[in-house]
Amino acid sequence: MFKLNALVSIALLGLGTAARAEDGYDLWMRYRPLASPARAVAADHATAIVAPGISPTILAAVAELQRGFAGMAGETPPRARLPSAGAILIATAQQAPALGLGQPDLADLGGEGFWLHATHVHGKPVTAILARADIGLLYGVFRLLELQEQGVPLDGIDLRSAPKLQLRVLDHWDNLDRTVERGYAGQSIWDWWTLPDWKAPRYTDYARANASIGINGAVLNNVNAGPESLTAPYIAKAAALADVFRPYGIKVYLSARFSAPIELGGLKTADPLDPAVKAWWATKADEIYRAIPDFGGFLVKANSEGQPGPQDYHRTHADGANVLADAVGRHGGVVIYRAFVYSETNAEDRAKQAYADFKPLDGKFADNVIVQVKNGAIDFQPREPFHPLFGAMPKTPLMMEFQITKEYLGQATHLAYLGPLFAETLDSDTFAHGKGSTVARVLEGKVDPYRLTGMTGVANIGVDRDWTGSPFNQANWYAFGRFAWDPEGSARQYAEEWARMTFTPDPRFVTPAVDVMMGSREAVVDYMTPLGLAHQMATGSHYGPGPWVSDLARPEWNPVYYARADANGIGFDRTATGSDAIAQYAPELARRLADPATTPERELLWFHHVSWDRPMASGRPLWDELVAHYDHGVAAVAGMRRSWAALAPYVDAERFEKTSTYLAIQQREAQWWRDASIAWFQSLSHRPLPAGSPAPAHALGWYRALDFPYAPGH
Amino acid sequence: MFKLNALVSIALLGLGTAARAEDGYDLWMRYRPLASPARAVAADHATAIVAPGISPTILAAVAELQRGFAGMAGETPPRARLPSAGAILIATAQQAPALGLGQPDLADLGGEGFWLHATHVHGKPVTAILARADIGLLYGVFRLLELQEQGVPLDGIDLRSAPKLQLRVLDHWDNLDRTVERGYAGQSIWDWWTLPDWKAPRYTDYARANASIGINGAVLNNVNAGPESLTAPYIAKAAALADVFRPYGIKVYLSARFSAPIELGGLKTADPLDPAVKAWWATKADEIYRAIPDFGGFLVKANSEGQPGPQDYHRTHADGANVLADAVGRHGGVVIYRAFVYSETNAEDRAKQAYADFKPLDGKFADNVIVQVKNGAIDFQPREPFHPLFGAMPKTPLMMEFQITKEYLGQATHLAYLGPLFAETLDSDTFAHGKGSTVARVLEGKVDPYRLTGMTGVANIGVDRDWTGSPFNQANWYAFGRFAWDPEGSARQYAEEWARMTFTPDPRFVTPAVDVMMGSREAVVDYMTPLGLAHQMATGSHYGPGPWVSDLARPEWNPVYYARADANGIGFDRTATGSDAIAQYAPELARRLADPATTPERELLWFHHVSWDRPMASGRPLWDELVAHYDHGVAAVAGMRRSWAALAPYVDAERFEKTSTYLAIQQREAQWWRDASIAWFQSLSHRPLPAGSPAPAHALGWYRALDFPYAPGH
């Protein structure tokens, strides 16, 4: 038997893997054959699976284990009733004693945590996966498989893990015509047209991937929502997806259009305090819960960028949120209410408006409302200081909104690992209750006690075969899931895990690849928006540089609004002499930010308007420093290309070539960004380029004339 | 060695195939392991590959053979210098003697034909693939692999084949934003945004699939063309695709917007007789040929459905075609000029307008122009009589335009095999030069001598993993390629070939599956547009029934224009008492069509307006016969479902489930079509339904109120 299996393994290693292209579909769950001797060791640790449970979640967990070990160890572990040597035991606290595992103490694990634990049963070595509920067991199975894929030995394993946030949600900006707003990976994965009839296998793989990193919610449709998502046919379609996702612990949410009572209900108003409006939402929620008993709830974008909302009726956002919260609350649902608001009639600094709107409402939201706040006060820039609402809403649960799709960081083709961006925000200290009041701890409810906690990522997923448009974009999905599980985690660690599983655990690959990843976001900052600049992207598509744009209807849509460059200097004065946005931060932090000298240089131009000649830490004047950052960004991408080129021996042809090609595009576009930005700012600063820094390849007019009508995602 | 290979084969058959989902990506080129003993026989016929050529086309041919036999026989045949027993020899006429194959007579094969031939070299049995040019060898390789996949023994093979048409072209209605007009299989496969940098492996697989069925051209962009496709960046993108396609014998064509000299060239006119316009096109063609030396040429849709054209300048279509023909002709290119024209200012029967415009131009086109005529005079209906231009243009080459994407035949989800539709048109007798002047022979230049011949299919290809949106839609791509190679071929044979390769050669599968396919198009005709009805589809999307629509701006866009139903009867009088469209056919045919009694019932209402009470061949009055056809259509789909359900043992889970699900959708929609159509026509005929025919499920108003704003492809 062993001999035959060995031959089978050889065959799979040879023809089998050759025939199976690495097109990225399998994400970090590739389960490719392990190298010897790890393969035999893995097989010895998965001789059988003992799982007393029979729920769809347990069946999914067992199937995943079988799939994983069939791939990695070459043998499919059979399901068994009783523990044997080398078995994997999957048991809740209630089931554990009957398997000889005693009565484990799992009190610290919550409803979703797990304990991976090498132990002995009747003298036989086993690997126990224990949890208080089936979903924890599934999470434990995925973590065990991930460790195996990373080459971590299971001998002596003892790992307890529980999520620090309750709602770990992907937000899909997907429209019903299958376009995706700011989507750079093809059409929506939801084929609304053939739902609810055809449940594509991909929906299951989507659920597997999310469960593998602990994501437990999906908002199916765009925050810029039409009313149709709330009609019966589309509720049925959402219900079909919910049925697929349910075993994997993923709840479905819908973006709700605030004016749906008018558009669908035929009412004259959507005033949240109107009894007919309240009744309409309650009836609609009842209808949804009949189809989707575990429906997660509504996501709402209201009174923002043209969307209807409670302010249309002179009501507050709390009034708006609470009527929806009443409707879903009776069924256990929540309302995720976005704080991303700014008004075309408000001349105030855009960065201040969300705080101004929401801070006075602290404590006025219903218990099942959570307010979703973008990481920064503008809009998913390559770098933003953390949003001043974090730490400022002690009586209102806040949920982080990150953007995984890279609207402002090179979109599909640039390699930009967002782990450092996530970590930078999460590790930021709000000083809300003194030092150590980090954004991560605010989210966890450790700074102020929150009854709801959560993190949302705007998904970068589409129907592209590799899901996210490029191999390295997958890392941002992965890292988001990990940070949602543990906001205090390490961007480098998540990158390492991902790289080991997605490519190979070989350190000759992992170390340089992770170095490329870890430096990549700073490279983007440098070639797009160094030193605290923001929103310098071209209009609409946000593709490429447009720092000169000044003719848009709303002032805060213009890049010149943000850079405020002139002959004397550059930057947005947000101190008391300017918009005083810094006053929205805790006093200890606000004091530091009031002075350019105590403001981190990387955020200097976000908070201060300073002279081109201002001396920087390097000793260079600001103008020279700015140019040096642009140059560094371009050089960094060149370095990334060199590093990647050396990794060819460790990567399959398709993913190697695609990454190489995209890095070449990135280098070309980094140069474009650098040249166009310098051409523009030099036309204002009238200063010479520092020695060694070449002039832009073209005159400013050439860059201004570029036009890309078919840029994706817009 | 044998023993090891046998075990390897077992492994591949077991774990290997289980791990490799049948998601349809491999089309009919699956190359799965053959059953024993065919596997061993196949291996014996591919012990080595001897191919003296070194062109990219020959390298592609060798790689394909290796891939095919590695999959089917379990062993990769090595490339060898000299023939050995069981070798496959790939040689042009010039190379044949040196391999011991003598001097084959290949005069009848043209530049693209091939001869597959079991023979002996120095007493050793070999399989020879012979051709006059490398592309013929590649076609021969694909045919040999296809025979092998179908389980046809290669012993004693002797097959000569050459295409009967020169231009065998797929026409992609793909826009630069990746939407596809009338596309039901996801976005455009051309990722214009990452071209020319990233040449996705899928482009090569597209070329392989096309070459495997002899397609040798691809029009990359929509006939409703913007000017951007002719700009330098998009020419570079097209050139990148041409580079991928070139080894596979596929030329790239572009749809040209007639007014491009104005939009891109800044000219005041696009008058084809204006010297500046001529010069602009010549310069543009030179630019394209510098990037794509074997550029196929331009496809033009002019003065049709709002597109600009020569009539804007009071010039003829010949004037318009010839200026473009001059531009590309110097480089060996052609102009494919569409005859699909009808005017909003022409009150004449739409079915007559193309003939009226083009017939007077016969003989006035340049030598490198071919006029592309849709199969029928309206627009790709489930059934149309052949277009009267066929046989009527003795001095102008005509090219057939079929639509592979099923705009009017149930779009993505209905199973409708188009082979019988293609064959019905191709086998139609034009009587142009007496009996036997079939459309197929017109196209081949055998009725009138044509210097150019060809067939176009409007592609049904998108980025969906299975290319065409459903497994059975792939058959229409396949059959189109086969009919383009041999317009006198058999729809059933092509279905059988496809079914054997795409699923299994097992006759327990093939016979019933092909029966389903062969009856499927007639089922669609019956439940949508029986007895010669046409264009009863809903407005815009063409999804679902809309026979009542009468309020569109142009009369010929309204379904009521085509059915002309009233209290007395139904049908479009195209005899001398009506539009006299029949006068556009040859006299012998026109005489038959002048009388309802000698008109085929299946085309009755296309040519005649007749009483609801007219007795039909069945003895039933027309009204009852019409209802019987609708009922038959619904019943036929129910039968297709039953047949398919019984085929579960022979089909992998994913493709079986998807087909089952789509057949369930089709049955529901067939019922909808039947009910809505009967509800509408009964409101006019005021006649009772025949006994046994149930009333529609809803009142007419219910059907009229349905709305599908997100129907795909529009």
Image (cartoon, coloured by chain):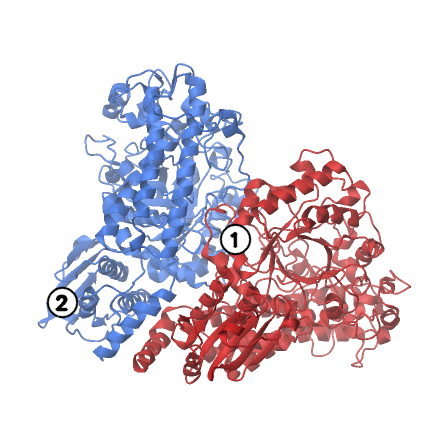
Chain colours: A blue, B red
The picture places residue A680, in percent across and down from the top left corner, at 45, 24
Judged left or right of residue B271, residue A247 is left
Q: Nearer the viewer, residue A686 or A197?
A: A686
Q: Is residue A198 visible?
A: no
**Which residue does the image show at 32% across and 43% down from the upper left?**
A642
Query: In the displayed image of the protein, which residue is found farthest to the left?
Result: A123
Q: Tag count in the figure? A: 2
Which quadrant of the figure has residue A61? bottom left
Query: Taking B294 as reference, is B619 left or right?
Result: right
Looking at the rendered structure, the secondary structure element under dot 2 is: loop
Across and down, in percent, residue A688 comes to: 39, 18
Does label 1 lie on the same chain as label 2?
no
Measured from the top left, where is residue A33 in percent x and y? 27, 65
- Residue B518: where, in percent of width, then height? 63, 76
What residue type is disc 1 on?
Answer: Asp
Residue at x 42%, y 42% (from the top left corner): A665
The quadrant where residue B230 appears: top right
Identify the image quadrant of residue B229.
top right
Placement of the N terminus of chain A among the 4 image quadrants: bottom left
Report the front residue among A396 and A138: A138
Q: Residues within 10 Å of mark 2 (few under 14, many from 20)?
A: some
Q: Is residue A424 above or below residue B381?
A: above
Q: Is residue A390 above or below residue B241?
A: above
Q: Which residue is mark 2?
A: A101
Q: Which residue is mark 1?
A: B243
Tell me the number on the disc at residue A37. Answer: none
Q: Residue at x 25, y 55 (%)?
A: A112
Q: Amino acid at mark 2?
A: Leu
